[in-house]
Amino acid sequence: MVEDQLYHITYISTGRDNLRYEDVKDILERSNVNNKVEGITGILVYCNKHFFQIIEGSKAAVSEIFQKIQVDCRHDNIVKIQEGPIECRQFDSWNMAFKSYNKELNGLDDFNNEQFYSYINCQLGIHNDVSLRVLADFFDLNG
Ligand SMILES: Cc1cc2nc3c(=O)[nH]c(=O)nc-3n(C[C@H](O)[C@H](O)[C@H](O)COP(=O)(O)O)c2cc1C
């Protein structure tokens, strides 16, 4: 299928203090429902209270979801890392993939460490993108 110009936003944030398994589960469930409707794909990574997220799709859909995310009280300190047009999706098999480095959230993971490492490095071989590079460094530090 030929798509309109694709766009992405990548950011990091800090989860609120008492964030629990059920909160993250709820974020992922809502994300998967909404993102499917809006044609959004991407990944959410969680490590020691910090989120990292890549959101891909049409500019309108990505901007709209990001506006909602920015006012979500389950996190704060939102810092945008990258925003702009992209050639193709890097997480086209997931409406919102999830990878956690906190074992209490392992039940929500789409990848184990080895699968994640291999997927990110394979994608990096295709597109040497800043967001993926940050993600790979994140893995090197935390994996
Ligand atoms: C770290 C984080 C990531 C999120 N990612 C998404 C997302 O990818 N898609 C989405 O629809 N909502 C996401 N949310 C939830 C939104 O902030 C918001 O609660 C939700 O979109 C509201 O959905 P509703 O309008 O269907 O009630 C995220 C929230 C947090 C805290």
Image: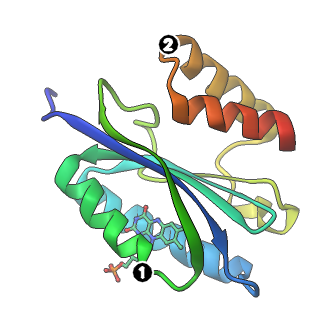
Type of amino acid at the residue the image marks with label 2: Ile
Give the residue pinned by disc 1. Answer: 71
Q: Position of residue 82 (x, y in %)?
A: 45, 42
In the picture provided, is 60 more to the left or to the right than 96? left
Observer able to see residue 143: no
Residue 109 in sight here: yes
Query: Is the residue at mark 2 in contact range of ligand 1, meaning its CB lies under 8 Å from it?
Result: no
Where is residue 132? Give x, y as percent. Answer: 57, 31
**Residue at position x 74%, y 29% in the image:** 117
Whether residue 115 sits left or right of residue 69 in the image: it is right
Q: Quadrant of the N terminus?
A: top left
Residue at screen point 32% across, 51% down: 40
Would the CB of label 1 be found within 8 Å of ligand 1?
A: yes
**Residue name at image x 64 percent, y 36 percent:** 134
Lateral position of residue 95 relative to residue 26, left or right: left
Residue 112: image location, x then y, percent: 77, 42
Q: Which residue is mark 2?
A: 126
Tag nearer the camera, 2 or 1: 1
